[in-house]
Amino acid sequence: MPDLPTHADVLAAAGRITAAVHRTPVITCRALDALTGARLHLKCENLQKVGAFKARGACNAVLSLSDEQARRGVATHSSGNHAAALAYAAGLRGIPVHVVMPRTSRAVKKAAVAGYGARIVECEPTQAAREATLAEVVRSTGATFIHPYNDPRVIAGQGTAALELLADAGPLDALLTPVGGGGLLSGTCLAAAGASPAAAVWGTEPAGADDAFRSLAQGRIVPSVDPRTVADGLLTSLGELTFAIIREHVRGIVTVSEDAIVAAMRLIWERTKLVVEPSSAVPLAALLEGKLDLGGQRVGIILSGGNVDLGELPWAVQTR
Amino acid sequence: MPDLPTHADVLAAAGRITAAVHRTPVITCRALDALTGARLHLKCENLQKVGAFKARGACNAVLSLSDEQARRGVATHSSGNHAAALAYAAGLRGIPVHVVMPRTSRAVKKAAVAGYGARIVECEPTQAAREATLAEVVRSTGATFIHPYNDPRVIAGQGTAALELLADAGPLDALLTPVGGGGLLSGTCLAAAGASPAAAVWGTEPAGADDAFRSLAQGRIVPSVDPRTVADGLLTSLGELTFAIIREHVRGIVTVSEDAIVAAMRLIWERTKLVVEPSSAVPLAALLEGKLDLGGQRVGIILSGGNVDLGELPWAVQTR
């Protein structure tokens, strides 16, 4: 296992990526404060480049490469925001980017990633095929593999969102993020450890994909098996790096129901007028469902992304 | 007809309402620039108090009242954003507010207006009943009637959005707003006349509710008869004040199809991650449909509001 990243790495990442990503706004919302009893500060990573915080980690990783490494390009496997983010980051540096995607991925997803300039390499929709295909891409091109979350550079980059949130909102009593692979949560832990050490960092997770909750309880990485949740950004399992950081720093992980996620997502759209993806709504869902009682506290929430297929929403919509 | 408001009235309104409303952000979006060929500056009035620019005019009107007038309260007829805005403004000043609404208005609309503290007075759903009921409310309470748009204080207040847009974006080549009753468009004309006199101000209107277009062509107010459009904020006819200002200042009014409005609205949601109501999408629709060619120009657009029933959207949505 490589050395764990530290608060200093988050600070370095912030300097490295400052011209590559947006400093997204932090908003407050009286209606949501009234519903939760907390004083919420929402970090709008849905307004980030590529529509998600993942731009931060990908940019930090790509901008950390030596010229020699960079020349040979980068590669990853992901059908989601990380693939788009890595393609965006590689485009900024003008280097090749290869993305392994299952051939069964939806055409719209492939087109989005290709639209950012990536070469799509299709594989069979199995874990083994994905790994073998990626290994072959790396072997034949010399590209550097950038894991979606289990990479010190990616973790440090994701931590810059919380760093900015703390700088803009001031010290907070609590910080909440969703948990999938744990890149955002572990980066947030590192950011808070140096910038707001009294802040309690909580992970929030769908009950239908509660591998991080179980991993923390059992003291070992419990893989995500057949996860089912509307929050399709949170299906992955923790990695050894993210788990080690989360285990050391996090106050706890709470799980929420699907109904609470959908209700929180709709509430954010209605009250803040921001389009967020389901994953972004998981922290608010934890407050609304009473899984965390942070009444009267100053609470930071990272709205992780805003990439939603507007033709497919998790609530019933009549066409008028 | 009362005196027409002027640029000086817009400046006075800006000072009067500064603590009562948000200075909303102005955003840019490369994807929308690429699609339109223009350099767009979007003024986010969907993020305004009560979710629409109408908070500006209502606050200016309420804060312009003498203490004696204010004590007797304010009244209006409106089932939309103006009613909520007037209730919000009256609440700030701690004065009574009476809103005449057809008894057939949807319960959710009545609840929203009541939620801002208004007394709802129901009437039969006819123009005559509405006017008679309002007259009776004014007679019995001494409240001041604040018209949704045909009022110099309201027009001046609405103009403050363009004033801020011009201050933040710098001089613009063109300014685009939707047109319903003309309060936003006429206020924008007054703001631009003093702050960016070279800017061409355009009104944009649904073809299915093209009374402003026809009024301008015929040189007299043509009432809106049986308007049909998804942009439900734009059903009303021009007033004598708004028409006089628009006629003098506006470069022109263009009309757009329903399909273009819906496509533009969806595009704004997708690309900017902002929830906007259909009326807000009409200016972008005019560019996308080729009704205005502003290629290469610096263009300001006022995103007028974000109040949408998320259970009813103008495109087909599957529930996942």
Image: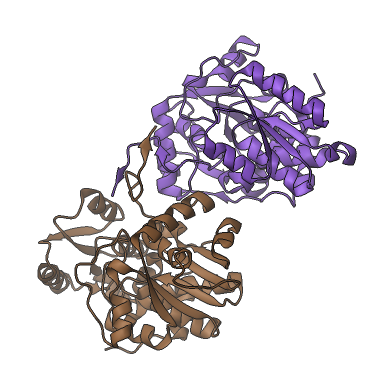
Chain colours: A purple, B brown
Q: Is residue B224 left or right of residue A9?
A: left
Nearer to the camera, A35 or B157: B157
Up-down relation of residue B79 to residue B210 (above or below): above
Q: Position of residue A253 (x, y in %)?
A: 56, 23
Q: Position of residue B69 (x, y in %)?
A: 27, 76
Q: Is residue B139 visible?
A: yes
Q: Is residue B112 left or right of residue B41?
A: left
Question: Which residue shows up at 45% across the image and 50% down it?
Answer: A273
Which quarter of the figure is the N terminus of chain A placed in?
top right
Q: Could you say which quadrant of the image residue B202 lies in?
A: bottom left
Up-down relation of residue B244 to residue A71 (above or below): below
Q: Is residue A195 visible?
A: no
Question: Which residue shows up at 50% across the image and 49% down it?
Answer: B270
Nearer to the camera, A177 or B62: A177
Seen as rendered, the residue at the extreme right is A68
Q: Could you say which quadrant of the image residue B121 lies in?
A: bottom left
Q: Position of residue B173 (x, y in %)?
A: 56, 78
Q: Is residue A188 left or right of residue B263?
A: right
Question: Which residue shows up at 59% across the image and 51% down it?
Answer: A25
Up-down relation of residue A319 to residue B223 (above or below): above
How many tags in the picture? 0
Up-down relation of residue A121 to residue B66 (above or below): above
Q: Position of residue B11 (x, y in %)?
A: 49, 80
